[in-house]
Amino acid sequence: MDKPRLVIVGNGMAATRTLEELLTLDPDLYDISVIGAEPCPAYNRILLSPVLSGEQSLRDIVLCDEDWYARRGIRLLLGRTVTRIDRARRRVLADDGTQLPYDRLLLAVGSRPVVLPVPGKDLDGVVTFRDIQDVNRMIAAAATHRRAVVIGGGLLGLEAANGLAARGMAVSVAHLAETLLDRQLDAGAAGLLRRNLESRGLTFLMARQTAAIVGDDAGRVRAVRFADGSEVAADLVVMAVGIRPNAALAEDAGLYVDRGIVVSDTMQTYDPCIYAVGECVRHRGVAYGLVAPIFEQARVAANHLARHGIGRYAGSIAATRLKVTGIELFSAGDFAGAPGTQSITLSDTPGNVYRKLVVKDDKLVGACLYGDTADGAWYLRLIQEARPVADIRDRLILGQAGNAEA
């Protein structure tokens, strides 16, 4: 009897993790095809920063090479973009004419970087930071040019800035807000982070709105101009100002899309034959761009694709870490402290250590750590489990070692 056909569109971390989970549950259930737009095998996207800085290579971060798929009888199609989903005939069509029929379809098409709609955004030397091709462009630029401007002081922006500095470039970071990582850190931790990065040679231009990217007569970037009229010289400009879910393919197929492919707690779209996971989806009004929630989604999707039918994804409390060697930071939950919360803070500026814990109704609801993050996992578990902390509140700031019995 012929096996049902599973087609996976996308060959990134979400697709690979779902596939691995599915093969663990039932390796022989499906005839599987995987189609990905990138020409290389699946790789760990969160380790692009060490590749940029020169600490690792693409080979080091590959998740599954082509032999891995071949040994499992999985058809792998690389360098091909799916342009249409024909739901009536249950098939996907690619830009090279490939047609893949499916009984179940998994969309793991990720996200795309936001490009600021400013004059000069298409100049030579303006790049984003999303995939290995972007990293290769930055590495090539660093070999022949000196001055870089990174637009965006979030996680990706700081990782790009650190990597370019490690390759010898003079790097300025322009950020719209007053503090770095304003969505991941409070002002106390952000101040310590900025001081650390400045000691590495990075320059920060805070509260700056990019108005235009200025080019030379040859069509290459030469400067970034801000709304206040000031300019900073640049041979390379990296836009790291956010991501948007890739939902156009699903929307064109008539699936429900609302700033992402809308999925249920079983990771199904509004078509019961089609599942979606990763940065392309929106679940209970939230889109996740961090790896831990995406892996949780993958586990649930695999459970249902394997016909176990018992997994549910109820959303995630995501934790943030910065992938810059020598810098330890962690945040989770409501670290800023909404009305009705109380904060417990420990600040050792000379020692570069900062802790802020946020409590509400005798439960830990947020944590922000800088310098010493060893207790991050313990605090995250307390937040996720919503455990009462009244009996250890006086010692909560001491971490797990100070609360051995908790």
Image: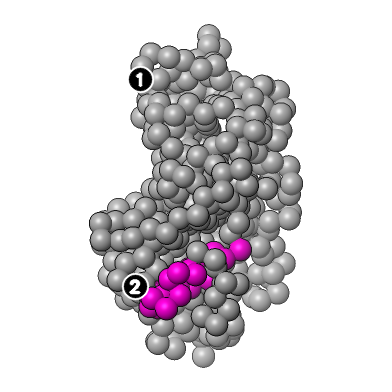
Q: How crowded is mark 2: few (under 14 residues within 10 Å), some or many (20 or more)?
A: some
Q: Is residue 324 above or below residue 356?
A: above
Q: Where is residue 367 in the image (x, y as percent from the top left)?
A: 45, 60
Which residue is label 1 attached to?
Answer: 227
Which contiguous range is marked in magenta? 374-396
Q: Is residue 285 above or below residue 48?
A: below
SS of the residue under disc 2? loop
Q: Position of residue 128 (x, y in %)?
A: 51, 37
Residue ID at (47%, 20%) = 224
SS of the residue under disc 1? loop
Q: Position of residue 30 (x, y in %)?
A: 52, 81
Which residue is label 2 attached to?
Answer: 362
Q: Position of residue 288 (x, y in %)?
A: 41, 59
Disc with the residue nearer the chain's start (2 vs 1): 1
Residue located farthest toward the front when viewing the structure as drawn: 394
**Toward the viewer: 98 or 375?**
375
What is the chief secondary structure element of the magenta stretch? Answer: helix
Q: Would you say residue 375 sits in the magenta stretch?
A: yes
Q: Would you say residue 73 sits in the magenta stretch?
A: no
Q: How crowded is mark 1: few (under 14 residues within 10 Å), some or many (20 or more)?
A: few
Residue type of the residue flagged with mark 1: Ala
Asked where in the image residue 92 lies, by quadrant, the reply is: bottom left
